[in-house]
Image (cartoon, rainbow, N blue to C red):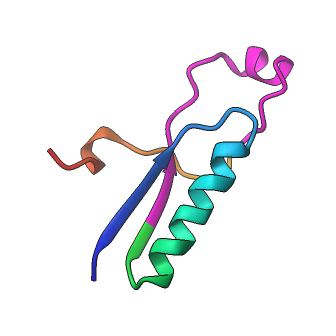
Amino acid sequence: MANVLVLYYSTYGHIERLAQAVAEGARSAGAHVTVKRVPELMPPEVALKDGEKPQLEIDVGAPVELPY
């Protein structure tokens, strides 16, 4: 079984939905899938003012999780 890491950044939720669809497709093909997001670079108050969709339920990925 393949291991797949779907790592994404989404400001307004569009790419998050795409990432979830990619993950579901990989799962349906039999892969073990982990979905993680890139940490936010903007300060929280700026992100919320800009209308960013909070994604607190998705864990943040770490560089050690990426293959070399």
Find residue 29 and report its horizontal and vertical position in percent.
43, 83
Q: Position of residue 8 (x, y in %)?
A: 51, 44
**Residue 55 appears left or right of 53:** left
Tell which residue pokes out farthest to the left in this image. Answer: 68
Q: Is residue 49 magenta?
A: yes
**In the image, is residue 66 above or below residue 51?**
below
Query: What's the residue at 29%, 50% (across, down)?
Result: 65
Tell me the quarter of the picture where residue 40 sits.
Answer: top right
| Screen quadrant of the N terminus | bottom left
Image quarter where the C terminus lies is top left
Is residue 22 depicted above or below 11 in this figure? below
Does residue 6 sit above or below 37 in this rendering? below
Where does the image place residue 43, in percent across and percent down from the top left? 66, 16
Q: Nearer the viewer, residue 23 or 52?
A: 23
Q: Residue at x 57, y 55 (%)?
A: 19
Q: Residue at x 84, y 26 (%)?
A: 51
For residue 39, say whether it is visible.
yes
The region drawn magenta spans 34-54
With 1 as the anchor, is 31 left or right in this view? right
Q: Position of residue 39 (x, y in %)?
A: 52, 33
Q: Is residue 13 magenta?
A: no
